[in-house]
Image (spheres, rainbow, N blue to C red):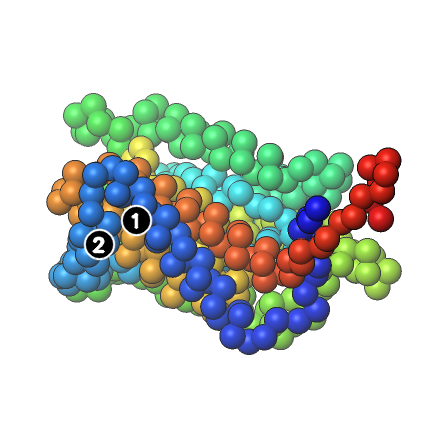
Amino acid sequence: MIRLKFEPRLDNPAWMNVMIPVAAVLTGLFAGGVLFAFLGVNPFRAYWAVLVGAFGSTYGLSEIVTKAIPITLTALAGLICYRMLIWNIGAEGQLCLGAIATVAVVRYFYVDSRIAMFALMFLAAALAGGVWGGVSGFLKAKWNVNETITTLMLNYVAINLSEYFIYGPWKDPMSMGFPFTPNFPPAARFWVFGSTRIHGGIFIALAITLIFQLLLKRSKWGYEIRVIGENPRAARYAGINIAKNILLVTFIGGAVAGLAGMSEMAGLHGRMSRGFSMDYGYTGIIVAWLARLSPIYVPLVAFLMGVLLVGGDTLQVVMGLPHASIKILQGLILFSMIGAETLSRFRIRIVRVGLRAKGEEN
């Protein structure tokens, strides 16, 4: 008889760190091609349609960048928690809280100054998202409540809370019955690049990327996060306050996701509407892992994920496929990444097992 034995790898060659995400994406795309074939669509034509839809026009390129902005922020929000093995699945809800806080500032604290409004919206969105993420962090630090469950369930609370305001007290009386809040005044809007929809939120995303890269790679606090994630017992013996760091990373992660909500409100939509997020919080999970939890690679991977989202619209129009097919493709890529990550951490050995007369292993 034989069985498989997983042994931890002591070190990985540099080429493996590069090939793992590439292999994961290619495997996911291959699995997606099989799915397209079962749906009666030529996989090569489908992927070609995605590329043409994404790169075939200036509009497509600008939309990729526009979608990459919130994806980058939600990926960074999850990444800082994942580095400490805190499974923050709540970026979607934290994004919604940031959006709600942004609309509240515009509605109740409006000042006819772009600088003042930016500061107020920034602080409100970061605080709202941070507190929402910090709730799960507190429960984890205080009573060891599973943060995967709490962050996921809080997503639904946040989404329904946003819909309460959209359909209820904040609904625009001039929207002819559609679920919209009133349009933001000019002082509460980000600047945009030319005739595109690319907005100033791109600078927030890039700035936080650089800050996270420096914090996680060069600072003492970043070292503490890595130690806690790799060996919590050693971190305790070293005197690192694990509970404090759990609260800190969940608050910071939630704050960054809240800024994604702010950038969508003030930069892209200019008001809150139903389904404004487009599941960016969940897409950020895939991007964080495809980037191997390295902040500097997140914007690039977010751009590539934006290609899938923009090209997915073409699949609907040209191929007649549902938009959900792109969501399935994202899931296949994530599963491929999880499998590839497992292979990078563990070496698989085939062990021959002999049996004694009474069925015991030798």
Q: Secondary structure at mark 2?
A: helix
Q: What residue lies at 19% left-to-right and 56% top-to-bottom?
A: 48
* Residue identified by numbered label 2: 44
Which amino acid does the dot numbered 1 rest on? Gly
Lateral position of residue 194 relative to residue 30, left or right: left
Percent position of residue 134, x then y: 61, 44
Lateral position of residue 112 relative to residue 246, left or right: left
Query: How far is mark 1 from mark 2, CA to CA?
Result: 8 Å
- Label 1 packing within 10 angstroms: few (<14), some (14-19), many (20+): some
Res 237 → quadrant:
bottom right
* Residue identified by numbered label 1: 33
Residue 212 sits above or below residue 140 on the image: below
Q: Are marks 1 and 2 in contact (CB under 8 Å)?
A: yes
Residue 136 sits above or below residue 189 on the image: above
Lateral position of residue 153 relative to residue 273, left or right: right
Pick the front one: 346 or 110: 346
Pick the front one: 33 or 291: 33
Pick the front one: 113 or 281: 281
Percent position of residue 72, x then y: 41, 58
- Count of numbered labels shown in the rendering: 2
